[in-house]
Image (cartoon, grey):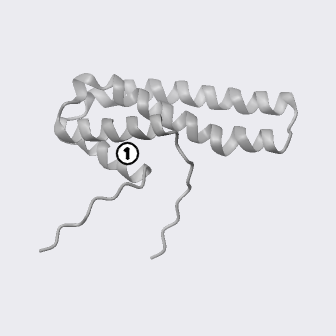
Amino acid sequence: MTHYHLNAPLSAELGARAVAVSAALRSGKLGPDKSDEVSELIVDLTDFTMRYFFARPAEAFKLGLASRGMIDLGIRSTGKTIRMALRQVLPKLTPEQFKQVADYLDEALQITKPKKTA
C-alpha cells in the first residue's frame, strides 16, 4: 500500500522541542498531570503547519489583505479551539495513553524507530 505524507519543514527549535517532548513522554517525565507542555507543543506544530500550507501560499499568490486576514483569523481560531480541546482531553488520559502521544508526535515528525527483529 502506498502512503502519502504532507511535509512542512520545521525550524530546528520546534523540531528539537518536539523530539524532546516525545522522549519525555516515553520516559514518563511528562504525564497527564503535566499536560500543558504537550498541548502547547501540539498547538505550536498545528499553527506552524497551517501557516505553512495556508498563509505562505496566500502571500506567494499575493492575495489581498482581506483574504490573508481571513486565513489568519481561521488559523488563530483553530489554534484556540485545539488548545481548549487538548486542555480538556490530555489530563484525563491514563499514563499509558499519554505515552502513546509520543507515537503520534514521532509519526508527524516522520521519526521512525528501527523495528525489532525476532
Q: In the rendered view, does 117 fall on the left or right side of 79?
A: left
Q: Residue at x 31, y 37 (%)?
A: 20
Q: Residue at x 11, y 74 (%)?
A: 118
Residue 51 on image: x %, y %: 64, 37
Residue 68 on image: x %, y %: 78, 32
Helix, strand, or loop for circle 1? helix
Q: Residue at x 23, y 30 (%)?
A: 30
Q: Residues within 10 Å of mark 1 (few under 14, many from 20)?
A: some
Which quadrant of the structure image shows residue 33? top left
The N terminus is located in which quarter? bottom left
| Marker count (numbered) | 1
Q: Vertically, is 113 above or below 90? A: below
Q: Nearer the viewer, residue 62 or 75?
A: 62
Which quadrant of the structure image shows residue 86? top left
Q: Extreme left residue here?
A: 118
Q: Extreme front residue here?
A: 12
Residue 59 on image: x %, y %: 79, 38
Q: Residue at x 64, y 42 (%)?
A: 52
Residue 92 on image: x %, y %: 26, 29
Which quadrant of the structure image shows residue 17? top left
Residue where numbered disc 1 is placed? 105
Q: In the rendered view, does 25 fall on the left or right side of 50?
A: left
Q: In the rendered view, does 50 fall on the left or right side of 117?
A: right
Q: Amino acid at mark 1?
A: Leu
Q: In the rendered view, does 53 fall on the left or right side of 10?
A: right
